[in-house]
Amino acid sequence: MNTELEVIPLKARLRHSGLVLTALAAIIASPVLAQSGKTGERVMIPTLQSADKDLGVQAAEAIRSQLQKQTNVRDLVVVPKADINNSLISSGYSTTEALAPGDAKALATLVRAPQYLEGAVTKTPTGYKIDSRLIISRDMTRGQALPAAQGGKLDDAASQVAHAIQDARRQLPGEEACHNAVAQGRYQEGVAAARAAMSRYPNANIAAACLVDAYAGLKMDDSVIVVSERIRASDPRNIVALRRLAEMYRAKNDTTRELAVLGSLAAADPTNIKLLQDIVNQYAATGHAQQAIPLVRDLLQNNPGDPQLLNLAWLVYLNAKDYQGAIDVGNEMVRVDTATATADYYSRLAGAYAALNQPQKASEAAARGAAKFPNDPNLALYAAQSLYKAGQLQQALVVARKAVAANPKNPPGYFLLATIQGALNQYDDVINTLNQAKAAGADPTALSQIALQQGSNAYKAGQGSKDRADFQRAIKFLQLSDQLQSSADAKFLLGASAFSLGQSATIDANEKRSCDLARTARDAFNLAQINLPAGGQKYPNEAAQLLTAIPQFTPAVDNEIKRFCK
């Protein structure tokens, strides 16, 4: 896994290059850098987070002072306050405000400090409290949470932090050896180096993170989980451990644990936009987009008008089926960046309105999209659907035909066209539409279901109207459905429709002394006898009842044919 991550907060993106360029001259001219190679590694202590700006500055200087007192310059060099301030001032940064994580990493790199401190200082009823982490400059996700320091005086708390920094740095030579070994694929050497580092500092989470990388390279998944959970227990904000755990639980299909880890990962670094985007995408991938909504809402609130985040939020709201939220974000997205108003955008927007049962707005959105992308079949289909739901059948018919013409292998297009034609009582057109779809290579299963639905509707209509035309229409659709894909449903309804047709024709043939009706009755009963046994596989009682009734009509039909067909 690539753990190198440098995410510059949005507010600092434009200024970051200036920080790199303008600070360089000041750093090179630094008296400390001008010394010979007899000095130790450099560590940077920037301004700490604090509700009191002065306190954040004072705490940082107190830690620098204590660390300088406790160490020898041959072992460790504390980057002077002047060097830090010169770099910040020349780049337009405040010297009294704590830096964002990405900016702190950039500044540490500029002042050539392999490690830097991030932390916060607060006043307590009895004095001061400092919470801090020692961070590796080459990878800001790798840090060591230091013990909370408290003291009646600021220098007392700062002294504790200084001691903790020295203790935590005992793991660094071994961690660097582990890092180099893992980078070269020498994972067993990495394991040995990490373990040696951890023996020098029992709570060595920076070295433990490298041990996790080495275990991952060796495909020792259970060991990855064990060490990562150990890191997480002592440092819930450790991004390396949390990422590894998310990967491992995902690989094991343990969605419950994976989602819990993703939540912790989001809370670990809420200013890291790239990290949050990855987490949001993973929520969606696991089918839990709803849980990503609070994250994208915070991202948009903290970074208003960012096109990339708006697009991410748009997709998250859609996946979470929060259609009103999607519509609101989508409108803002295309306002900020008109290039995002694609054919897909209009299709999804129309779908969102349709899901909210707002057919008029869905129709308007689809129409806007169709006007901009006249050859897009999906937009034409959405427009037709919206017009149909709005009751504008003739307009829907025209647009549906365009949708089918644009994509002749799209079963939903044929289904919609056939549905509209059926609503307009254009039953012959429905038959033609289904045959055209079959010739175009559309899925016969879907087409069979369309014909089955039309046949079922016609049969139900005939049951109420007792009109032979309804039963005849049902037979045509059901025969087509069975031809496209044979089914017990189609065969039973075909037999039932034929029986009802035969029953009606028998009665009317006798009253009207009609040869044609008598022959219609005979053919209908024959059709029923052919199809009802197969339909009886799914509807045994109903089929048996109809098959038993047919012989009661046969003598009368035969008699009518003899009498009327001369």
Image: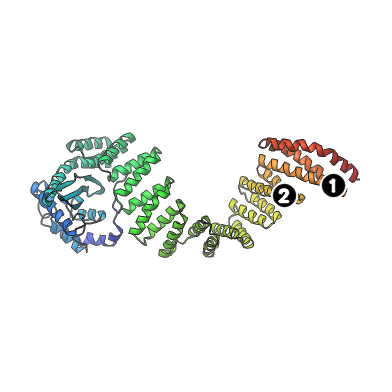
Closer to us: 71 or 350:
350
Q: Position of residue 218 (x, y in %)?
A: 31, 35
Left or right: 32 in relation to 255: left
Q: Is residue 453 above or below residue 310?
A: above
* Residue 423 visible in this rendered orientation of the protein: yes
Q: Position of residue 533 (x, y in %)?
A: 71, 36
Residue 87 lies in quadrant: bottom left
Mark identifier at residue 56: none
Category of crowding for the residue at label 2, using alpha-carbon neighbours closer than 10 angstroms: few (below 14), some (14–19), many (at least 20):
few
Category of crowding for the residue at label 1, using alpha-carbon neighbours closer than 10 angstroms: few (below 14), some (14–19), many (at least 20):
many
Q: Residue at x 11, y 51 (%)?
A: 153
Q: Which residue is mark 2?
A: 464
Can you say which quadrant of the picture contains the N terminus? top left
Q: Which residue is mark 1?
A: 509
Q: Is residue 261 above or below residue 61?
A: above
Q: Is residue 370 above or below residue 512?
A: below
Q: CA distance from mark 2 to mark 1?
A: 21 Å
Left or right: 543 in relation to 406: right
Residue 305 lies in quadrant: bottom left
Q: Position of residue 529 (x, y in %)?
A: 76, 38
Q: Residue at x 27, y 46 (%)?
A: 237
Q: Position of residue 556 (x, y in %)?
A: 85, 40
Left or right: 285 in relation to 449: left
User: What SS does tag 2 mark?
Assistant: helix
What amino acid type should be assigned to the residue bearing mark 1?
Answer: Ala
| First of labels 2, 1 by sequence position | 2
Q: Residue at x 64, y 56 (%)?
A: 420
* Residue 185 visible in this rendered orientation of the protein: no
User: What SS does tag 1 mark?
Assistant: helix
What amino acid type should be assigned to the residue bearing mark 2?
Answer: Gly
